[in-house]
Image: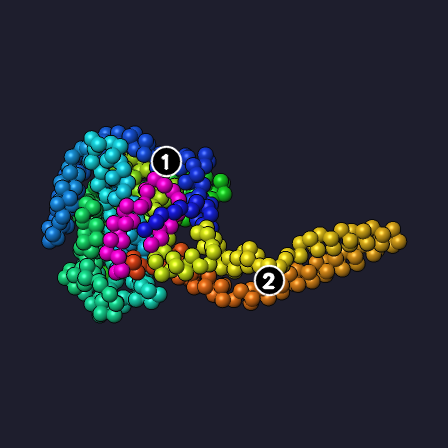
Amino acid sequence: MHLSTVALGDTRSFTPSFLDYIQKKESLTRFYHRFPLVENFKDQIDEKSTSFPQTNRDVLVSVLNGQYKNLIMTDVVKRNISRLSDKNTFTVTTGHQLNIFTGPLYFIYKIVTVINACKKLKSIYPGKHFIPVYWMASEDHDFAEISYFRLSGKKYTWATDQLGAVGRFNPKSLESLLNEIPGETSPFKQAYTKHDTLSDAVRYYVNELFGEEGVVVVDADHRELKKELRHVMTEDIFKNTSKKLVEEKNAELTTLGYHPQVFARDINFFYLDHQLRSRLEKEGERFQVVDTDISFSLDEIAKIIESEPEKLSPNVILRPLYQEIILPNLAYVGGPSEVTYWLQLKGVFDHFHIPFPILMPRNFALVIDAPLQRKFAKTGLEINDLFEEKNSLFKSWVLKNTHHNLALSEEMKNASRLFDEIRQRAIKIDSTLGPLVGAEEKRTSKSLEKIEHKLLKAEKRNHADKLRQIEVVKDALFPGGGLQERTDNFLNFYQQDPQFIQKLIRHFDPFNFSFHVLTY
């Protein structure tokens, strides 16, 4: 496997706000704490060390041991969980939804990034321990987003009528889908048929795929962990503090020309129960669970916070804070939209005196297998060319490879000069003739553009075979016109190459914020 890189800006695939972040634009620095450079982790370690209590470590280890009790742990995972009780141990975390069969490729890329970040940090700070963590979005209730994946161009979808937090779903109805999927899927067969919840199933297959690298899976849907969030629940539900803090940052970002991605509510918690995760809203003197007949008095909500905090689930505004409260975490690894929405949350972290983690972009990648690479080599294209929009790619290829001059730009300039002369002569005779000459110039310009378009179209027909080859490569690597990593599943490569994940680990650099192109 060969590695090359493309600047993220050259891929035409990322928002200005994300590109400004990785380019360390000065105006954004007040929205985060430390930029993701290896040397900046020293101060992050010191800050987290003094702010993360031993009691939180003890609770975390106890919960994790319970969650892993029915799983055969690798020695390194067992050691990593134990080490979390040590004050010199820290985590680097990524989070993601519980997509079936891992969902799009970037799920794998996220975890590889945290693995490699921990390895790099260990080499620089040998006296500390760094644990790669995958945070399961087990409380999320958007089933539609996790219900499908694509393999070899085909979409596979899980149909179930279960409701509520997806981590609590029973995955055994996935067995019929398993029978439709070609190739080796044994980690998933064991995951989905031998476990009673989707959370347990996902923990199993992540352990199968990444256990030797020491990845620890955290399911925060747990009473003991939620207890550590009770002070945030109280302040958000009764004082609506978070909304004001987020709105202040949103206003600042808007003034700078950025568009906020998430918006706070008065109450940023859901009510969570069996087959139910629904927003909590204040209506008069009661707290209503939206779209249900369930409501609570102020005293009843206070009692839930105290005795049953697991029944309250943070939304996108407070989930990041929850993560940093229960983990000795130094950095969060996320995609472009995640990194940019975290910038809206700095005020919330400051208010609750929780260190804001270093925001690390995950690795981005395009994988070209051997058959496709052979086709790509015949096109004469460069890697950067692949990121062009298809019609633009065809045009640029034809213009580079034609033996004819298809451009009429010089003729258009000459025509413009000629009409300028005619206009000056006409105005001297009759000033009202100026607009007539201008209209004729415009008509001539459009005619020349039409001829130029026809010349290009004709030349494209002359190169139809080559353009079809280019189209095959482009469509395979950019399914639906989007990035491969956002559509294709890792089984496209893993089934042919069981060392696929290890090769990603070997080639990805978590501190290189470029687009990685991996070619077999």
Could you tell whether 387 is left or right of 493 in the image?
right
Task: Name the foreground residue: 490 vs 53.
Answer: 490
Up-down relation of residue 177 to residue 215 (above or below): below
Q: Residue at x 21, y 50 (%)?
A: 210
Up-down relation of residue 175 to residue 250 (above or below): below
Q: Residue at x 78, y 54 (%)?
A: 419
Please give the count of numbered marks on the rendered protein: 2
Up-down relation of residue 40 to residue 135 (above or below): above
Toward which corner of the image does residue 373 lie, by quadrant?
Answer: bottom left
Up-down relation of residue 456 to residue 421 (above or below): below
The image's mark for residue 175 is none
Residue ID for mark 2? 456
Could you tell whether 384 is left or right of 321 in the image?
right
Rendered-image quadrant of the C terminus: bottom left
Residue 282's spot in the image, x, y percent?
A: 32, 50
Rendered image coloring scheme? rainbow
Is the residue marked by circle 1 packed among few (<14), some (14-19), or many (20+) residues within 10 Å? Answer: some
Residue ID for mark 1? 35
Q: Residue at x 31, y 38 (%)?
A: 357
Asked which secondary structure carries label 2, the reply is helix
The tag earlier along the polypeptide, 2 or 1, is: 1
Task: Name the foreground residue: 313 vs 19.
Answer: 19
The magenta region covers: 494-520
Q: Is residue 438 visible?
A: yes
How far apart, in angstroms, are the residues tagged by discs 2 and 1?
47 Å
Residue 303's spot in the image, x, y percent?
A: 20, 47
Q: Is residue 508 magenta?
A: yes
